[in-house]
Amino acid sequence: MGDTPGNVSARAVVLAGGRSSRLGGTPKALFRTNDRAHGREAEHGSTLVEHLVGDLLELGLGTQAVVVVGPEDLPRMPTLRTREDPPFSGPAAGIVAGLNALDKTQPTPAWTLLLACDMPAVRPAVVALLEAAATCAPEDRGIVVIDDGRLQPLAGIYRTGALREVVRDQPSVNRSVRSLVGTLWDRELALSGVTDDVDTWDDVDRFGLLPPRD
């Protein structure tokens, strides 16, 4: 773990699965960004999941403190990897699989980020969440982003112990994120325009994304 914003110790679960049904099954995680616009050099642009992982590593999270939850055909990245069980059983199942993978590493950071990989502009939200965690009262267990009035369940940060306790022994297959971890949303972080996600082809065009490589 490096020097993160707010100087908090943190780890992250990155969700990169899902059926992408509104995109005709084209995996959202594999759409490519314009890396030159973000100050990175990449011949063909990085995928959305690589883009988010790159942000997390640049913000000081260690390679063993980030787990990507998704299919085996995702790009190779210097992070932990796992898959929800059974595959395509929803983001709550992905969270549990990610936590199980992270729990095998030591030391255990105080905070855990839960993030979807399909938010191309999410870096400022990650920074804001880490900084907010540094100022939390001892009783605060979790912070979730409210972006332009819309709650974003997969842009949040949690005390690791509280997160582990609340998901322990709970069923997670085909459940919503809110039903799994919503009781931990003790604080809301108001932001604007940084957690818009990629759900449709209009979103692909709006973000200027490139199609996955064959």
Image: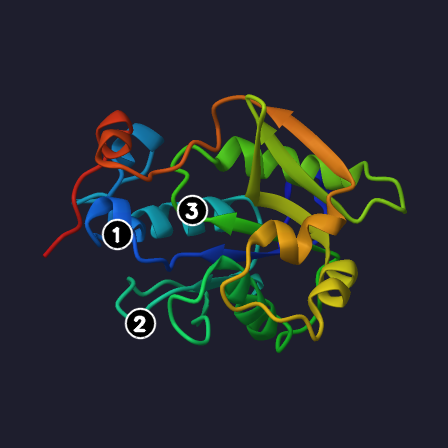
Which of disc 3 and disc 1 is earlier in sequence? 1
Residue bearing mark 2: 72
In whole angstroms, how far apart are the C-alphas of marks 3 and 2? 18 Å
Q: Secondary structure at mark 3?
A: helix
Report the amino acid beneath label 1.
Leu
Which of disc 1 and disc 2 is earlier in sequence? 1
The outermost residue toward the left is 214
In whole angstroms, how far apart are the C-alphas of marks 1 and 3? 12 Å
Q: Position of residue 1 (x, y in %)?
A: 63, 57
Q: Quadrant of the C terminus?
A: bottom left
Residue bearing mark 3: 52
Task: Please give the name of the residue rendered at 75% of the width and 49% of the height, measured from the top-left corner.
Answer: 184
Mark 1 Cα within 10 Å, few/some/many (few <14, many 20+)?
Answer: many
- 164 or 32: nearer the eye? 164
Residue bearing mark 1: 30
Task: Please give the name of the residue rendered at 38% of the width and 37% of the height, measured from the top-left corner.
Answer: 120
Q: Does residue 70 lie above or below 112 as drawn?
A: below
The quadrant in which residue 111 appears is bottom right
Q: Position of residue 11 (x, y in %)?
A: 61, 57
